[in-house]
Amino acid sequence: MLEKVLVANRGEIAARIIYACREHGIGAVAVYSEPDRLSPHVLLADEAVPIGPAPASESYLKIDSIIDAARRTGAGGVHPGYGFLAENAEFAAAVEDAGLVFIGPPPEAIGAMGDKTAARARMESAGVPVVPGTARALKGEDDALATADEIGYPVMLKAAAGGGGKGMRIAEDPASLRAVFPRAESEARQAFGDGRLYVERFLTAPRHIEIQVIADAHGRVVHLGERECSVQRRHQKLIEEAPSPVIDPETRSRMGEVAVRAAKAVGYRSAGTVEFLYQNGEFFFLEMNTRIQVEHPITELVTGIDLVREQLRIAEGRDLSVEPDPEWPRGHAIECRISAEDPLNEFFPSTGRIEVLRPPAGPGVRWDSGVAAGFDVGLDYDPLLAKLIVHGEDRQQAIERMRRALQELRVVGVATTQPFHLAVMSEPDFLRGDYTIRYVENHPELREQAHEAEWQEAAFAAAVLLEEEARHGLHGVSGTERRSRSTSRAGARTLSAWQRALDTE
């Protein structure tokens, strides 16, 4: 039995894991970099250990520092969350070699699915359908051209050593393949330290569907249904929902069976996700994420399963407590990723201090957050601030609930993706569930609708700043000085957004 777990992560997922540890009756240790010393996950944990300066390479990616923190605090297990070292087989092996429990899959499973070309080959041998392409790394540009001629254009180059949109390039013909090959190779090398690429046929209008699986150490694997993840930009997910609007029970069963087969093929243990591309009734293996997913809460809401706590049980050697229920999915759940990115400026990262944060509440609303008022948002880490998740009796109610929750959410100090999400919740194709991974690029009008939502948010921000000025007794100073003080204290980015909105009226 675990008595204490070190959480090798930060932000909302670290807080999520700490909550699960507390409910499971075990202690939680946080680690933090210098700028995160007062972060919510640090204050929430039972103990907290500093592990280095801001750069992730000197803190959250330092394997020795994390293992040393676990030893010094007496933690018996390490939960990696997602990102950072979560899918690093070397880290998982180092944790086990230190006599600690890695709360995730075996290192061998991480390694098997981490190399995308090896994973494709393994899946093919297990009878899992894959998109036509190479099951090996390309030898160079000429090899890519020859392979593309065989499988047909358009094709996509992908990094062999990792995913998340890094090293991905689409080629419509030989000329464009020659043009993008060196860029894809360079980006893959920078992101993963490995420039190897592979190529596969590019599906023109697929949906991104993933199946949640969970497996114990005794060979039992269960799938918990699908999540629709097609609203994405540059291969980064923005909005997810469960169930998918287009997957019927028969297809769900078939995809679930294939996902279970994929997990068993690598001796999987813990929570994981098998991702597919779905088009015209066919589905193809994309990759397996050997960790808890960002969007796991929507599966929890439609199944009633606490996935993180189940991970803790499995790590303790217990049998899987999950029993498939024919009533799954129950209702409908939607998740919006609230990130510090400006949708009116090509989703450019936004930095600054969060001066006001008022999350929504009410029936069916869940707020998984890694920030609070007073938190400084920088460029060192992923811009995800929080996840807004709702659950309804059906898809229509879930959309209405999400719209209401987004309207209630207040963030002052940094630009966020909130206005974009609000625009999507009223867009006709999304309302019909008629969309693919091309959704964002096919709907440029969402930018203008997001602009209108931002204007309303900026008006609120201005009201907050005026209220703050009154509270701090600033009405007696000059207008110039008053604007300077309020801007330095809270409104630089929000006020600039307000001005931008006014300028375009």
Image (cartoon, helix red, strand yellow):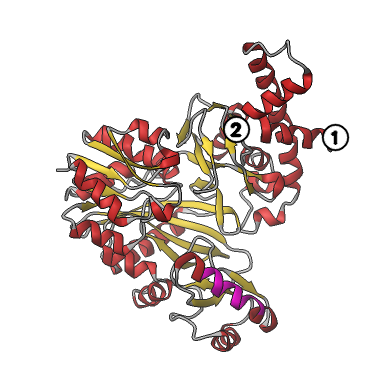
| Residue receiving disc 2 | 406
Q: Position of residue 271 (x, y in %)?
A: 32, 52
Q: Position of residue 338 (x, y in %)?
A: 55, 40
Mark 1: which amino acid?
Glu
Q: Position of residue 121 (x, y in %)?
A: 39, 77
- Dot label at residue 505: 1
Q: Which residues are magenta?
A: 179-188
State which mark lies toward you, 1 or 2. Answer: 1
The image shows a total of numbered marks equal to: 2
Report how far apart the C-alphas of labels 1 and 2 lie in the structure. Answer: 23 Å
Of the residues under marks 1 and 2, which one precedes in the sequence? 2
Location of the C terminus (image quadrant) = top right
Q: Residues within 10 Å of mark 1 (few under 14, many from 20)?
A: few
* Res 382 seen here: yes
Q: Which residue sits at x=31%, y=56%?
A: 63
> Height in image: 362 above or below 450?
above
